[in-house]
Image (cartoon, helix red, strand yellow):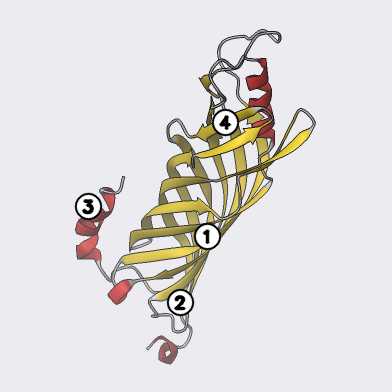
Amino acid sequence: MVKIVPLLGLICLPYAGIAQRTAWSAGVLGSYGHYKFNPAERQFGQYQLHIYGVEPLDMWRFGVFARTSLGKPTSPWFVQAELDRSGRNAHAQLENLTPAGNSLDFTISSPGARIRRYDLAVLLGVRPLRSSVRLLAGPVVSYMSRRELLRDNYTWDSRGPFTPYRRIEEAFYRGFNRVTVGYQVGVGVEFWRVSLDLRRENNLTPVVGQVRYEGATYRANLTGNLWMLTLGARVWEKGPTDKKEAN
């Protein structure tokens, strides 16, 4: 995915400076990317678990944005606010690190959980040398509106050796925080009314905070990260009313 950025730059160099500089604009956007947990080791009761993302999972988002120039309408600096609806599948692997011979010795991939969120981002952007290339960075606040535990394709005996694991798994995904804070950084190109960015998002607050297991509360403090491609299109814009102001 990282290789896409140089290619985009070469393609869009002829269009440098074509993107209109307006005082205000608004539009729609969509993203596709990959999400993954950052690895960590946590204690749940008698079990020391290694928690990590098995593989990147798909994520998507659709939303709207509003943008305004900082200073003069022709300024290379701008602020862009984004509000979107996003979805992803959270998938972690829980590996038991307790001593050999323990009755529960497992390394099983968790079915995961389906997450739906509302995200609000406020990004500061700049167009270096007033070109069509743009850099963005800023905070993101997310609200989890839906969490659905996914189940694997096999059934399990409630009296079997993996019963504690299934209980830990359920407690783990029920520990997802409703509200999280993170940040985005990105680079992209803009020409005419269309923009295309490659962005990275990281958590500043935990995705999974406190986990309740067998009547006790454990601090998980797990975070995640994602890479995504974001395509935006301006559908409304307002230019400067005073020609002197635009100069």
Does dot 1 land on a helix, a strand or a loop? strand
Does dot 4 land on a helix, a strand or a loop? strand
User: Could you classify mark 1 by the number of other residues whose Cα lies within 10 Å: few (under 14), some (14-19), or many (20 or more)?
Assistant: many
If the image is split into quadrants, where does the C terminus sit? bottom left
Callout in the foreground (3, 4): 4
Q: Mark on residue 49?
A: 4
Picture quadrant where residue 155 is located:
top right
Task: Determine which residue is flagged by label 2.
Answer: 239
Are dots 2 and 1 in contact, CB under 8 Å? no
In this rendering, is residue 190 above or below 50?
below
Q: Mark on residue 7?
A: 3
Horizontal side of residue 143 vs 244, given as left or right: right
Q: Earlier in the sequence, mark 4 or mark 2?
A: 4
Q: CA distance from mark 1 to mark 3?
A: 26 Å
Q: CA distance from mark 2 to mark 1?
A: 17 Å
Q: Earlier in the sequence, mark 3 or mark 2?
A: 3
Q: Mark on residue 190?
A: none
In this rendering, is residue 212 above or below 219?
above
Q: Amino acid at mark 1?
A: Phe
Task: Determine which residue is flagged by label 1.
Answer: 65
Callout in the foreground (2, 1): 1
Q: Amino acid at mark 3?
A: Leu
Q: CA distance from mark 3 to mark 4?
A: 42 Å
Q: Point out residue 142 in the picture as x, y percentages from the top left corner.
A: 61, 51
Q: Point out residue 3 in the picture as x, y percentages from the top left corner.
A: 25, 48
Q: CA distance from mark 4 to mark 1?
A: 41 Å
Callout in the foreground (4, 1): 4
